[in-house]
Amino acid sequence: MGIFLFFCLGLIVGSFLNVVALRLEAGTDFVHGRSACPHCHSLIAWYDNIPLFSFLFLRGKCRTCKNPISWRYPFIELGTGLVYASTLWLFFNSVEISAWIETVWLLGLFSFLIVVALYDGKTMEIPVSLLQASALWTAGALFLLDWNLSTNMIWSLDGRTVSGLLGALGAWVFFAALSFFSKETWMGWGDSWLAAIIGLAVGIKGVFFALTLSFGIGALFSCILLLRKKAGMTTQVPFGPFLVIGTLIYFLLSQLDMIQYGGSMWIANFFS
Ligand SMILES: [Zn+2]
């Protein structure tokens, strides 16, 4: 029941994240103002603005002008619904304080990351304000998680805070090198800061596997584009969305006990 409620909550949040990303892109005030159709500018009634269901009911077309509604709305709504439901399912229990902290932190972090992915997918840029917010939010959560165990954990090499900082450093150095040596043709500087936040979140033990997943998904997607002749070898594909999808999958897998000792162990087992 709780999981179903969180799925519905995720649908609603996803709908909101879509609007936040669109209005950040347009540089408009995203608190006020109602949503309108981008084609005919008619305001969207509340009953046509119900996450997922309105898209299905309207068969993906604006009620007034019959122009198609972007697939990104139902896709992100459904995706956020699934992410919220699985976060609750995999990370939450009502007994442990750490589970409360981790669940709230991840729901917030994943929401930030979904907006980053949407924005980067459209503009090939990553807004600094979102990165700063995600970094602060994550650093605060790691600190609380360690502090909840003992004050010594905050400075301990076994703690999440130190592990996160090392992960962030490792990811940043790797991506910064890619973007420096390729003169930003493979990776942009925005990607290196996003990768640092992901390193912070997953820690030094998880960073290799999370980034490998992202590269794998990105490579697969590029191959599909090439095969369908929608892209040439020189087409630039934003990498942010793959980093975000890789991270989401990493967190889900990490709780399903498919990664026990971080990426290197998993890969070692895989090839042995
Ligand atoms: Zn319309």
Image: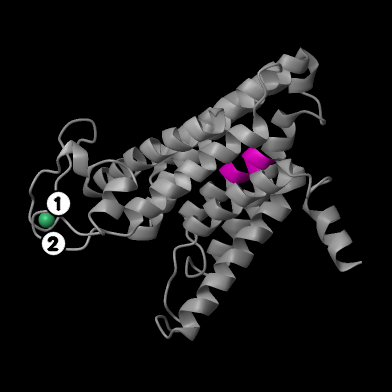
204 with respect to 33 (left or right): right
- Which quadrant would the N terminus be assigned to in this image? top right
Q: Nearer the viewer, residue 165 or 144?
A: 144
- The first of marks 2 and 1 along the sequence is 1
Pointer 1 residue:
37
- Can residue 124 be spotted in the picture? no
Q: Is residue 141 above or below residue 16?
A: above
- Can residue 270 be spotted in the picture? yes
Q: Quadrant of residue 160?
A: top right
Q: Nearer the viewer, mark 2 or mark 1?
A: 2
Residue 61 spot, x, y in % from top left: 20, 59
Residue found at x 72% / y 54%: 208
Q: Which secondary structure, mark 2?
A: loop
Q: What amino acid does circle 1 point to?
A: Cys
* Mark 1 residue's CB less than 8 Å from ligand 1: yes
Q: Nearer the viewer, residue 169 or 39?
A: 39
* Mark 2 residue's CB less than 8 Å from ligand 1: yes
19 with respect to 182 (left or right): left
Magenta segment includes 258: no
